[in-house]
Image (spheres, rainbow, N blue to C red):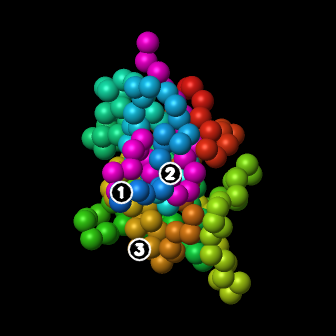
Amino acid sequence: MTRVILFNKPFDVLSQFTDKGLEGSKRRTLSDFIDVPKVYPAGRLDRDSEGLMVLTDDGKLQARIADPRHKMAKTYWVQVEGTPDDAALEALRKGVKLKDGLTKPAKAQAIDEPYDLWPRTPPIRVRKSIPDTWISLTIREGRNRQVRRMTAAVGHPTLRLIRAQIGDWRLDGLESGTWRDA
């Protein structure tokens, strides 16, 4: 029987079980949180991003989730610098020109700060003279640092990035650094 684990990855954690970086490195990995044999992450989440990761022991399911050819929707809560206007949100919806080409259309909307948000350690930088805004952004591709590059391209750099949903799997109250079987 296939095992599927949902994990809320904290900030500053590598989305892999071992750190093959610098020898003697103390960077945290999935193995600091998940002690389940033979499950592997279906996709990656940058070290400076937080939120939902799906792990499974089923290679075909893992490929279906991670491979952009399958176009599985991924929704992010993005705290951005400034207040995006309708034109910025519409640009995200239509597709943004990046150095590696035009992104596919996305779903984008301003949202209230998520109600069950956990504190980030360390906290984001706050500028008293520049407001910040939360947006929900759903994409169906997975380029390197794509969400951060998209928000920057429309003039609103990302301050905090949380993946909230992958396909039908959602964070739904899963605390940072914890996991549960799906």
Judged from the image, the secondary structure of the residue bearing numbered disc 3 is: helix
- Look at the image and give the residue range highlighted in magenta: 1-21
Judged from the image, the secondary structure of the residue bearing numbered disc 1 is: loop
The front one of 181 and 79 is 181
Label 1, label 3: how far apart the Cα atoms are: 36 Å
Label 2, label 3: how far apart the Cα atoms are: 31 Å
Q: Residue at x 45, y 65 (%)?
A: 148
Disc number for residue 153: 3
Counting from the top left corner in percent of width and height, residue 14 is at 45, 51
Q: Residue at x 44, y 47 (%)?
A: 15
Q: Residues within 10 Å of mark 3 (few under 14, many from 20)?
A: some
Q: Residue at x 58, y 75 (%)?
A: 81
Where is mark 1, residue-wise?
Answer: 23
Disc number lying in front (2 or 1):
1
The answer to whether residue 93 is seen in the rendering is: no
Q: Main secondary structure of the magenta part?
A: loop
Residue 114, compared with residue 53, is above or below; it is below
Residue 20, compared with residue 99, is above or below; it is above
